[in-house]
Image (cartoon, coloured by chain):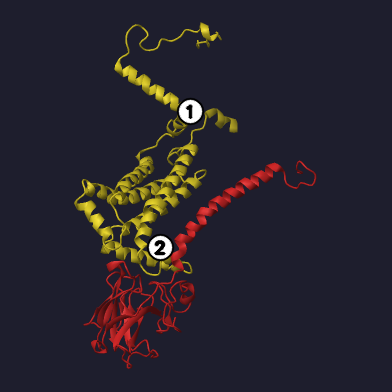
Amino acid sequence: MPGAFEGETVTRRRFMNVVTQGSGMVAAAAFTLPALGFALGPLFSRVPFNWQVIGTPDDFTKTTYATKVLTIVQGVGEAGYSIAYVRTRDPSIDTEPVDQYNHWVALSSRCMHLGCPVRFVAAAQRFICPCHGGVYDFRGMVAGGPPVRPLDRFYTRLNKATGLVEIGPRYSVNSELHRFSPRDPGQPLDGIGQYLYPARFDTSSGPAGHP
Amino acid sequence: MPKLPAPPLPKVLKPIPKRPGENGETMTPGQTAAEGGIHVVDWLDERTSLSGGIRWLLFRKVPKGINWFYTLGSATMFAFLNQAVTGVFLAMFYRPDVNGGAYESIRYITDDAFLGQLVRAMHKWGASVMIILIFLHMARVFFFGAYKYPRELTWIIGVVLLILTLAMGFTGYLLPFDQRSYWATIVGVNINGTGPLIGPYLSDFLRAGPEFGATTLSRFYAIHMMLIPGLIAALIGAHLYLITKLGISAPPWLKAEEEPELREAEI
């Protein structure tokens, strides 16, 4: 239907409709989009890590684990603590390739079923989760129960200047102890799992050249 | 013999009814109060026409045979109102501070604040009551077949309300910030994370980062006390509108009665 003047393709009523609804949408988007971005922002922010001293090389043995408390989130008090179980690498059982970051094997205490804290039971040489019965062997590989992958690990290094052992960011491993960027518990990394549970936007925080 | 309507007399000729107190006797205080109340209601109704809506909402026909099972929906709504009222007042004392402030504020509510233990218990136990009632209500609707045409949309909104109520339970569980809250939330967020493809991002959104951090608690608190309650209140409104518009379904054991003449006319 033509408009009031010759050559008009849109009636004035329709034009006013479009302008009114369009400006309403612009106004709504003007407060919705910034608010949404604000809520989603933490997905994309990098979390800084710092190497934390956990002891001297003599503090750790090949045959048992030492329990070390480390801070994974700064500024939230006890809620930011996590536990690492640390021992010296034993070439006779640790078959994964050695590099400068795994002279000490540091296992995360987070169960890879749903994230409860496992504890090391020295008598059984096993890690046992109290929540749903996950069991891991001495190397942190799944020995039974619902966990979907071996216990996560932390990078460790020897600080040559101070001669102290330091612990760094967490990484995840699949059942062949291949390294992946840190995933949440409950996300398998074998086979199709590594594609179904992609790396997150913000956590490629390992040392240079590592996941 | 039915009474015939009055003839159309001009207004001046119509008898004017006596106002209370015009018979010479004075109005009792009760009558004065009633008059005042009527004036206020009239004033509101003249400007809003609310009385029609209230009549539409409250004075509607209900089928024969309705029984106590039909009150489960209202019971759920009152459980929600209980949560809303107690929640508002708990929010006056609660601090979403991960550095021990949250736990301390809950301890203060429970141990020190006047009636704090009661109000917190009403909120805590009311949450379980609401979950139980909403499931009983859903069971009633399901077994009575009340979800069928034309009430499918009422059912769908009800399912969304159920999910939102469970989300309220999940977000509220963290707020006392004791060991149980913390680990339950870790587990709950990781269950979210097991969803393929979007799971990891959903967990990051819930936690506001890759680890349980400084703003996770305040995020849960904001979702628990602002985002979801607003949605629930709006959807309860839509749910009630549909119930009123479509009417209550009859119990399934009640057969529709046909007029005998109609039955014969079919043949």
- At label 1, which amino acid type do we have? Arg
Q: Secondary structure at mark 1?
A: helix
- The residue where tag 1 is placed is B47
Q: Residues within 10 Å of mark 1 (few under 14, many from 20)?
A: few
**Can you give x and y, in whole percent of width and height, for residue A41 in the image?**
46, 64
* Depth check, front residue: A29 or B5: A29
Residue B229, percent across and down?
40, 49
> In the image, B239: left or right of A82?
right
Across and down, in percent, residue B94 comes to 29, 53
Query: Label 1 is found on which chain of the structure?
Result: B
Left or right, B145 with reference to A85: right
Tell me if residue B40 comes above or below residue B146 in the rendering: above
A159 or B53: which is nearer to us?
A: A159
Residue shown at the point (30%, 60%) measured from the top left: B97
Check contact, mark 1 vs mark 2: CB within 8 A.
no
Q: Which mark is residue B206?
A: 2
Report whether residue B60 is seen: no
The lab-note entry on whether marks 1 and 2 share a chain reads: yes
- Chain A rendering hue: red
Q: Nearer the viewer, mark 1 or mark 2?
A: 1
Colour that chain B carries in the picture: yellow
Q: Nearer the viewer, residue B95 or B191?
A: B95
Residue displayed at 22% across by 46% down: B115
Q: Residue furthest front?
A: A161
Q: Amino acid at mark 2?
A: Leu
Name the residue: 34% across, 86% down: A157
